[in-house]
Image (spheres, coloured by chain):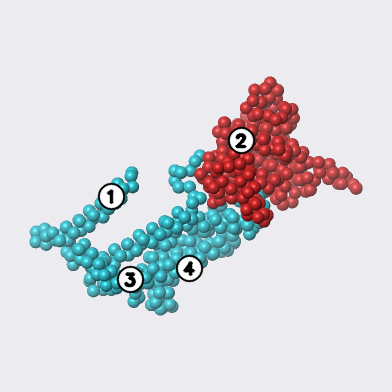
Amino acid sequence: MGVGGAETEHAAGRAVDLADVTIAFPVAHGVYTAVERAALAVAPGEFVAIVGPTGCGKSTLLNVAAGLLAPVAGRVTVFGRPLETLNRQAGYLFQSDALFPWKTAIDNVAIGLDLVGVDKAEARGRAQALLAKVGLAGFAGRYPHMLSGGQRKRVGLAQVLIRDPKILLMDEPFGPLDAQTRQIMGNLLLDLWSADRKAVLFVTHDLEEAIALSDRVVIMSAGPAARIIGEWEVALARPRDIAEIKLEKAFHDLHREIWHVLRSEVMKSYAQTGG
Amino acid sequence: MPRLTLMALQVLVAVIAIALWHVLTTVPVGGKPLLPPFFFSTPLDVAARIYRWFSTSSVWIHLWVTLVESMLAFVIGSVAGGLVGFWFARKPLIADVFDPYVKMMNALPRVVLAPIFALWLGLGIWSKVALGFTLVFFVVFFNVYQGIKEVSPTVLANARMLGMNERQLMRHVYWPSALSWVFSSLHTSVGFAVVGAVVGEYLGSARGLGYLIQQAEGVFDVAGVFAGMFVLAGFVVVIDGLVTLVERRLLVWRPVAGETRA
């Protein structure tokens, strides 16, 4: 076995491995580079949060990990295998509404099983159980427009989890929700995650949310050509309560340390976009 | 506004309009009515005519023929429009190539096609079905095309991440989305089907509501023309009511304005 073999072995210890990934799009006058040589790995069972100023390309990076977008340079491997099409190991929770509006909550959740030919009754049973887990036992027959924003997120979470993906990709999933609902959803997510510890890549612009949820916080610089400019381990004990952990001294110290770096990038981003 | 009040007001509009018509055509002002009954008939004459049509059952065959023509035009036009719309939306090259021709055909006033259809298909029901078809086809075609083009990219990405292949995307995403657009245009397309049938009958036929009106007009029988118009209006209201029932049943998942929660 040569060098390549050793590398593969090394990568196999990672759920997702983005190696020197550059993402660019053709635009009217040339090429827009969104992300420049980003290197990021998530170990199995690890909860990683990506934080960066608005428009820094963190969602784009997530789309690359999902296989929805191909990088122009660099390699993406999933459990040691190069990613060529969609990432079948991953579940993706989108920022905006992604539920099928013409399906009821339970059908939205069960679809992941229907698609692979699971018996209809069994799929409904498992979907109902999962709906109960996310606190929506009594809402199975509702259509998405009859649910509140937080409830729709819960259905979305159940929809993704029913396929039992090994990797969870989340793109500012709680962004549109109000502060209280965000906290409740954060705790729900940690609860569900602690049961089987999937690898999580969580994109957010909220540093507090990132620290409270994750094992590791990754900071991206302002775009264009955004880079990863720092990583911090979050050594806070689990299980955590999002509301309470924010009162701890260790949380504050870490927040101050990371914010010191993040602030200048946020300012740069404001200067570019005019706020 | 309470339902009952609203209905009362709606009925009131009809009562006032008919009363005004009655007064203007029957009460002499300086020797003769303001509106000569020869040109405007009177509500009572029209009502008597409608009553006679129904009491002698002579109108049923005309209603039936118009209904059959409308429904055939609607069904055939919807199926064809839906299939072609689907095809165009999934094959952008085809859509681009045919784009000017589609626009051209849609801009054509359909009345000019009536003589051609009469020549090709005779004076029976099929020339009317063809005319209705040309109207319904484009309504459904444009809506299906739009419905598939306007599927939310997020919903589409989500569907793919959930593991849908091309066939499953059709069934679970494109098809329901297109259907919702078709159903939201149901009133328009059913209405157009009736228009096609009646105009076709008017221009040349031996049966149907359009024929009834055309016959009356030919002998300056204004009461007959108005009676035909009222029967046609009633016919359309009934069909529109049925469409509303179907729509409520099929589009339960759609938010009614003001009902959506944030």
Residue marked by disc 4: B76
Whether A259 is drawn above or below A38: the answer is above
Which mark, by number, is residue A185? 2
Three-letter amino acid code of the residue under disc 1: Ala
Dot 4: element: helix
Instruction: Give residue B136's position: percent from left, percent from top.
Output: 45, 64
Residue displayed at 43% across by 78% down: B120
Disc 4 residue type? Ile
Does the CB distance between marks 4 and 1 fall below 8 Å? no
Give the image location of residue A28, x and y in percent: 61, 47
Q: Eyeballing the image, is B81 above or below A210? A: below
Residue closest to the eye, A44 or A220: A44
Foreground mark, 2 or 4?
A: 2
Q: Is residue B136 left or right of residue B231?
A: right
The residue singled out by tag 1 in the image is B8
Chain letter, disc 4 residue:
B
Give the residue number, with chain letter if any, for mark 3. Answer: B60
Closer to the observer: label 3 or label 4? 3
Q: Nearer the viewer, mark 4 or mark 1?
A: 1
Amino acid type at circle 3 is: Trp
Colour of chain B in the image: cyan
Q: Secondary structure at mark 2?
A: helix
Q: Residue at x 34, y 76 (%)?
A: B206
Say which chain tag 3 marks.
Answer: B
